[in-house]
Amino acid sequence: GATFLFFSGDTVTIGDVSFKLKTPKNPELVPQNYMTDSLAQSVVQHLRWIMQKDLLGQDVFLIGPPGPLRRSIAMQYLELTKREVEYIALSRDTTETDLKQRREIRDGSAFYLDQCAVRAATEGRILVLEGLEKAERNVLPVLNNLLENREMQLEDGRFLMSAERYDKLLQDHTKSELDAWRIVRVSEDFRVIALGLPVPKYSGNPLDPPLRSRFQARDIYHLPFKDHLQLLYSIGSNISAERISQILSFATTLCSQESSTLGLPDFPLDSLSAAVQILDSFPTMSVQHVIDRLYPYNVFLGKEGRTAVKDALKVSIAYSYQALIVLGYSIHPFKTLAQYLLSFIFECVVGDIAN
């Protein structure tokens, strides 16, 4: 059945999971404007899963194809639960100092400035690491201890210690003693949300098994066909439902699991909302013209690839969403439609090669 999201006082509930909200110390660090009035059921299910792991004190790894969906879901969760964020986009140039501490010289004296991971740990924020597959393999292991037992040795001599161990020490020692020993308490609200692409399908460095085991992982694939169709219908009020279903069926076909056998690059599904807005503003523009803008296959594909894409486009336009229902093709799951279109494309491509 459907999963519902609602607020009751200072508690937010998704399905059967509830989270008690806290007032953020720095409200400017809480993401804004990511939540929408109507969330797709698949997104609500993802938010419920993240909330479950958050309540269990576990870090999560959202893995899926390129696009803003994973980051959007992470930010929606932080906005929903009023959590402060520390965000870093990882790259090949990211070093340990970008995660832990940076050294700075002021007035002839050296200072260490806490970076995102340390700030998140001490202030109880959520550390969002985007692009895990881009980081060099020797960089992320610095987070191993912080992820496993919430401990980390810092460059300035301080030592981050888990809230549980710190509170036990407080029973036998005073806070001033612990401060003298340079022990810093890691907040019990500290969590890590990592975002990455599946490697080897996409290029990048695979995660080391010890680091991977620190996360609870979830596959964040594109929105289901039905949810995406409803979203596009709400955006393009001046466009016929048939035109929207044509462009979505074509895009979903190129992103299906089976299309990888043709070696076709993924269609940028997340750009469809913008494409439908353009069609809504310029009703005389053709679907073909919009697709050429989003997916310039004539530029980056060879002869066989171009033929496959053109055939997919012909089929998508000839057999629109409504026509396929009449023909008896189910849209739930949408895979049946993708298989149908791809079988047609294979026949066309094989026929062209044979001729």
Image (cartoon, rainbow, N blue to C red):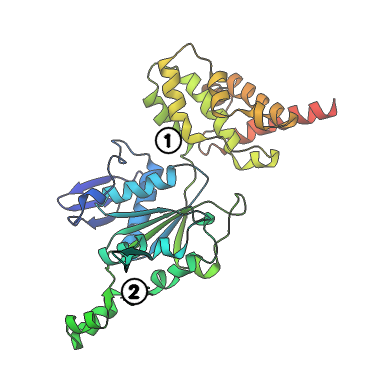
- Where is mark 2, residue-wise? 156
Comparing labels 1 and 2, the label whose residue is closer to the camera? 2
- Where is mark 1, residue-wise? 227
**Looking at the image, how many numbered discs can be counted on the residues?**
2
Element at badge 2?
loop
In this orientation, does residue 233 appear?
A: yes
Q: Which residue sits furthest front?
A: 108
Q: Nearer the viewer, residue 144 or 231?
A: 144
User: What residue is rendered at 40% in x and 16% in y?
Assistant: 281
Check disc 2 and give the amino acid type.
Asp
User: What residue is rendered at 53% in x and 22% in y?
Assistant: 290
Q: Position of residue 163 (x, y in %)?
A: 27, 74
Say above or below: 226 vs 242: below
Check disc 1 and give the amino acid type.
Asp
Element at badge 1?
helix
Q: Position of residue 22 (x, y in %)?
A: 19, 57
Residue 258: mark in rendering = none
Say above or below: 32 vs 337: below
Q: Position of residue 105 (x, y in %)?
A: 34, 64
Q: Earlier in the sequence, mark 1 or mark 2?
A: 2
Q: Nearer the viewer, residue 200 or 243?
A: 200
In this orientation, does residue 321 appear?
A: no
User: What residue is rendered at 47% in x and 39% in y?
Assistant: 224
Compared across the picture, whether 265 is left or right of 349 comes to left
Q: Position of residue 123 (x, y in %)?
A: 25, 63
Image quarter of residue 167: bottom left
User: What residue is rendered at 52% in x and 35% in y?
Assistant: 268
Say above or below: 189 vs 241: below
